[in-house]
Image (cartoon, rainbow, N blue to C red):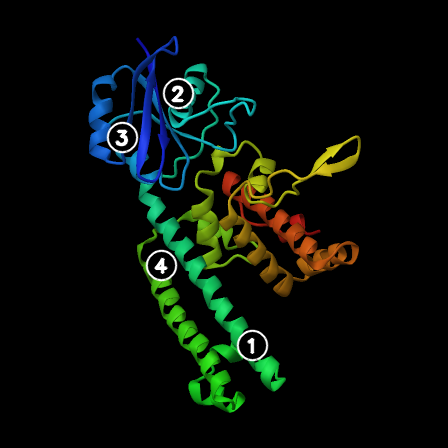
Amino acid sequence: MKLYAGIDLHSINSVVSILDETDHIVFERRLDNDLERIKCELGPYREQLEGIVVESTFNWYWLVDGLQEAGHRVHLANPAGNKQYSGLKYTSDQHDARWLAHILRLGILKEGYIYPKQERAFRDLLRKRMQLVRLHTTQILSIQNLIYRNAALKVSSNDIKRLNQEQLENLLSVPQQSLAASTNLVVMQSLEEQINLLEAAIKEHVKPRAEMGYLKSVSGIGDVLGWVVLLETGDIHRFKSVGNYASYCRCVESRRESNGKKKGENNRKNGNKYLAWAFVEAANFAVRYHEPVKRFYQRKKAKRNGIIAIKAVAHKLARATFHILKNGEPFNLARVFP
């Protein structure tokens, strides 16, 4: 007899439901988030289980990894792709777990990508670097704002990075203002140290790949952005088309139309926010240093605005990256930006 399991995962506990081929409940229990306990409860059914579905929540790593290591066939459910009927009057955790098992049995489960465990740590290290870079930028902007408001001086971000305490006190003579800016300066310098530490660790442990050479040929993409794109993309063959990849990178307009008129917007946050950031960063660098890209940007900007124009450049870079990774070919600037 074939069995199908669904796990409704929460922060401190999970509901495990196992159904047979007729949707009869074979096992159902709420368990603490204890991997050994969950494996123990599922153990007697392992040979009969066709699969276990876990919803892609923020904390799925430990459960999916543990179940796979125990020999179970695990599926990660995509929350955006598996929508329950909204007209139901009553649902519960038990109902959600059964539903996951049910759609697996019917063969209509929309699966999320289970990123390989061995590479996940490096990807998350790059995500941590991005988080610190944003905080670092916040400190720079705060110092610039304080100086401009109180001393009417515009100081570039590069000059802010080179400031010391004495120079800051000369720019801001009022002690309270100087103290406010100095706190930002200390935090900024501390973040710089941690960012450099993370970058050194990434360079030391990530193995060289042929794809990186192709990615670095893309306008605006260097070492750091190349690794972000490569590790966030994962297996390029999981994307059926270039349009799917561009959508995953959030480079496609979220728009709902009917009869030629805009009726609203779909979920703009569907996709990978880290890839979206990476391609916008690459677009800004490309516009600055590559003349064909700059001309394309200026044409788009004249029609709409700067933000839309940068997103258009990012869209082109994302589409080019898809073909580069899939076909193993270098970037052709003249082809992408004729």
Give the CA distance from mark 4 to mark 2.
45 Å
Residue 125 in sight here: yes
Q: Position of residue 130 (x, y in %)?
A: 45, 58
Give the CA distance from mark 3 to mark 4.
41 Å
Residue 203: which numbered mark, if any? Answer: 4
Q: Assign a secondary structure to mark 3.
A: strand
Point out the tag, 4 or 1, that comes first from the N-terminus.
1
Q: Assign a secondary structure to mark 2.
A: helix
Point out the tag, 3 or 4, that comes first from the N-terminus.
3
Q: Quadrant of residue 259?
A: top right
Q: Position of residue 120 (x, y in %)?
A: 35, 45
Kind of residue indicated by mark 2 = Arg
Point out the tag, 1 or 3, that comes first from the N-terminus.
3
Give the CA distance from mark 2 to mark 1.
55 Å
Q: Are marks 4 and 2 in contact (CB under 8 Å)?
A: no
Closer to the observer: label 3 or label 4?
A: 3
Q: Is residue 308 left or right of residue 82?
A: right
Point out the tag, 2 or 1, that comes first from the N-terminus.
2
Q: Is residue 111 left or right of residue 242?
A: left
